[in-house]
Image (cartoon, helix red, strand yellow):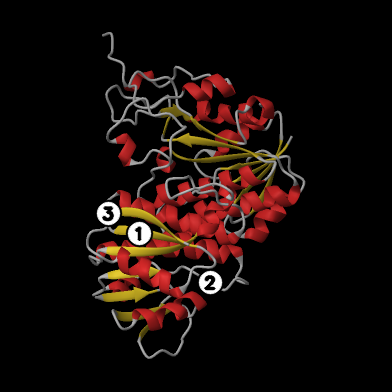
Amino acid sequence: MHILLTSAASPLSQSLVDQLAPAYSLRLTERQMMKSEHEFVLADLGHDASTNLLVRGMDAVIHVDTMPTETDTGAQIDQSSRCTYNLLMAAAGEGVKRVVYISTLELMAAYDGYLYDTRWRPQPTTAPSTLTKFLGESTCKEFAREGKVAVTVLRLAAEASPESIVGAIADALTDEQPVWQIVHVE
Amino acid sequence: MNVLILGGVGMLGPYVARHLAPHHNLRITDVTPPADPLPGEFRLVDAGNREQVLAAAEGMDAIINLSVLRQDRKIAFDVNTLGCYHMMEAAVTHGIRRVINTGPHFTLAGRSYEAFDYDIGPDIPPQPGTNLYALSKSLGHQISRIYAEQHDIFVQMYLFYNFRDPADVPPGSRHAPFSISWENAAEVFSLGLEIPFEKLPSRCEVFNVFTDMPHGKFSNEKAKRILGFQPRNDIAGLWTKGTG
C-alpha cells in the first residue's frame, strides 16, 4: 500500500516513519527540504498541479497537519484550513481512497471527568493547538460528507504511544472503514 | 457608535454605509478605494492582513465584516477564514464586544440541506460542503463562534443568498428562495448595532436575512423575532403572477 505522510519533519511523523515503513511504501512531504531514506517530495500544499502530483499513485494519505509550535497562529490556521482543503481536493481528484487526519484529544478537554466518547461534541478553544485541529477536522468532514474521499480522524492523547497510533492507523487503512469516522487514541 | 466596516466597498457595503451613516461614525475599509464617495472615514485594509485589521479596529465599538472572496483559493481562505480570525483577534485586543459577520446561506446550509429540505432555519449544524466559498466562509464562522464562546464578545452572523434591485424584478425570472433587496438588507445592520446584548439568546447567533417569501424553503422567522427585522415587500414581482 502506498502512503503519503505529511508534516514529515514533525516529531510525530518522525516517530511514525520507522514503524510504518515495514508495512507500507512511504512517500514523505514537508515544506522544507529534509533528509530521509524514504521517497521525499518538497511541497507547500498549494493550489497547483504539484499537489496533485504529490498524491498521485497513493492509496492513502496520513495528514499529520503539524507545524512547529512557535509558528504564527495565522500560518497554522492557513495550513489546517487552506492546505488541508488543497490536499483533500487533490486526493479526491487523483482517486485516493482514504485520508487519515491526525487530530488531538485536547478537543475534548472540556469533558475532563466525564466518560466521553467520539459522539460528544468537540469543544475547541482559541488556543492554536485545538482551534487549528478543529478547522482541519471540519474541512475533512465536508469531503467525507460528499463522498469525495473516506476520512478517519484520529484524535491523539498527548500520552498516546507510537505503537498505539500506528495500530489505529493500520485499522483506519483497512477496506472496511466507513466514509467518516472519528477514533480516540488514548 | 464607532463602527468598523471590513470589505465596505463591495456590492453590499455602500448600501450599509449610507444606511448607517446618519447614526454612526463609520470607518470603512477595503482593498480598493470606493469609486464613488462613501460616508465616513476610509482606509485601505486587507482583511487577510492581521496588523492592518488590528490597527483599523482601534477605537471602534463594533465591527461589521462584509469582506468576501469567492474564487481564488489562496485569497478566499485569506479573506473568508483568516479574515475572521483577524477580526476576532482585533475584537479581543481592543475590547470590542459587538461583531456582525456575514456570509452566504451555504456557510451553514450547503447542498446537503438545500437539495433536500424545507423550512431551513439558521440554527442548524454547518454543512457547507466542499464549495470553496461556502467552506472557507464556514470555517471563518466557526472561528468567530469559538472566540465568542471564549471571550465576552457577541457575534451576530447574517446569512444572505440573493440580492435584488426592486427596479428589476421581471415576473418569473430565476431567483433564490432567499432573496432581498439591497436596501432592505442594509437595514438589518442598524438593528444588529442597536439590539441589547441581553436580547440575544447566546454570544453567537445566526440569522437568515431575506424578505418574506411564499416558497417555504428557508426561514427568516428568527431575524424578525429577535432582531425585529422588517421585510420590505419590494421584490415580490419575481414570484407573483401579474393581474393583467
Provide the residue designation for mark 3: A178
Secondary structure of the residue carrying tag 3 is loop
User: Which residue is more in the foreground, A4 or A16?
Assistant: A16
Provide the residue designation for mark 2: A67
Q: Is residue B133 left or right of residue B94?
A: left
Of the residues under marks 1 and 3, which one precedes in the sequence?
A: 1
Which residue lies at the image location 32% right of the left edge and 69% below the top edge?
A170
The Cα atoms of the two marked residues, 1 and 2, are separated by 20 Å
Tell me the amino acid under the disc marked 3. Answer: Pro
Tell me the amino acid under the disc marked 1. Answer: Thr
Which residue lies at the image location 46% right of the left edge and 81% below the top edge?
A14
Which residue lies at the image location 47% right of the left edge and 72% below the top edge?
A161
The Cα atoms of the two marked residues, 1 and 3, are separated by 8 Å
Q: In the rendered image, is residue A161 in sight?
A: yes
The x and y percentages for residue B204 are 58, 37
Tell me whether marks 3 and 2 sit on the same chain.
Answer: yes
Secondary structure of the residue carrying tag 1 is strand
Disc 3 residue crowd, few under 14, some 14–19, many 20+, Cα 10 Å: few
* Chain under numbered label 1: A
Q: Is residue B8 left or right of residue A39?
A: right
Question: Residue B74, which numbered label?
Answer: none
Tag 3 and tag 2, C-beta contact below 8 Å: no
User: Which residue is more in the foreground, A29 or B233?
Assistant: A29
Disc 1 residue crowd, few under 14, some 14–19, many 20+, Cα 10 Å: many
Provide the residue designation for mark 1: A152
Residue placed furthest toward the right: B59
Secondary structure of the residue carrying tag 2 is loop
Tell me whether marks 1 and 2 sit on the same chain.
Answer: yes
